[in-house]
Image (spheres, helix red, strand yellow):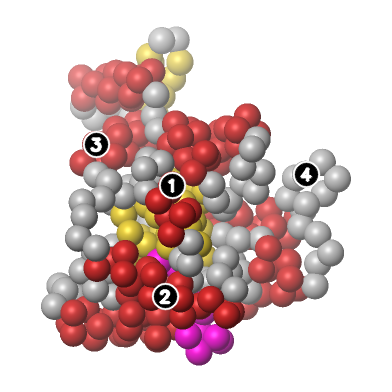
Amino acid sequence: MSLRSMLFVPGDSPRKFEKANLCGADALILDLEDSVAPSKKLEAREHVAGLLDHDSKRSWAFYVRINPFDTDLTIHDLAAIVRPGLNGIMIPKANSAADIVRIGHYLDALEASAGMPVGTVKICVVATETPTAMFNLGTYAPAHPRLVGLTWGAEDLAAAIGATDNRDETGAWTFPYQVARTQCLFAAAAAGVAPIDTLYADFRDAEGLAADCAFARRDGFTGRIAIHPDQVATINACFSPSEADLAHARRLIEAFEAEPGVGVIGLDGKMYDIPHLKAARRTLASAASRTDA
């Protein structure tokens, strides 16, 4: 399941869902949490459940961001949405992998009740939204069988620690949020799941989004959260290997295969070793996974 682009869609907005449905995102995250007013929570839950009941072929994975444990809405959200057609959930404001274990037990029972194979519903976690979470990022490894991705967020974390802002005068993340981003990346790598970068708030700034995605991909992120359908094409392009990337990866792998047992080779006047070989294999694997999806 590719998680290159994951688009948030308010769970109480049929109009926004219709627009998002055709935008080309790898996953839609129907939101029951922060984008839905408290008075609209039940309406949103019923709307999302109804979308799951609508039998249609989708080109995207169906995710739902549920409400966190401290709202007393979590189990009610899960009871409504765990049914055939649901691919995964996003857990907000998680404190550690213990939250996944708890959710996993609920999912086991709800899947069985819905006639779904146990393990069908995958989990993506927003792993940096509480101060406690920042001390527990290492708990996600080894990964729970349902865990497929970790992402991070700065807004709730800033509110939780009492920050007046999370960006400096240039628009760059201040140091605490650079730490959150970096630790999420390392935690995902340690768990062997997808590291997914957080949203880019200015959905009208396609050039800025592309530049920021290039930095994210350079650092090791494999996908990104979107908040508007217009961001999806840019995100998909930025997190997909180009034809040149694929061609170089194939040539590098072929060069190593031509000299078995060699740890370093020369190609186009440059030296490459085993870490480069691993990166080349990941490049081809990422392209294959998107073709399969």
> Which class describes the residues within 10 Å of circle 4: few (<14), some (14-19), or many (20+)?
few
Q: Which residue is mark 2?
A: 45
Q: Compared with residue 93, is residue 174 higher up or lower down, i.e. above or below?
A: above
Q: Which residue is mark 1?
A: 19
Q: Which residue is mark 4?
A: 171
**SS under mark 4:** loop
Q: Compared with residue 51, is residue 182 higher up or lower down, i.e. above or below?
A: above
Q: Determine which quarter of the picture holds residue 113.
A: bottom left
Q: Residue at x 46, y 76 (%)?
A: 43
Amino acid carrying mark 2 in the image: Arg
- Rounded to the nearest whole Å, what is the CA distance between mark 3 and mark 1? 24 Å
- Rounded to the nearest whole Å, what is the CA distance between mark 2 and mark 3? 32 Å
> Which class describes the residues within 10 Å of circle 2: few (<14), some (14-19), or many (20+)?
many
Judged by depth in the image, the label closer to the viewer, 3 or 1, is 1
Where residue 52 appears, as percent x and y from the top left, is 28, 66
**SS under mark 2:** helix
Q: Residue at x 58, y 79 (%)?
A: 38
Image check: 248 left or right of 209?
left
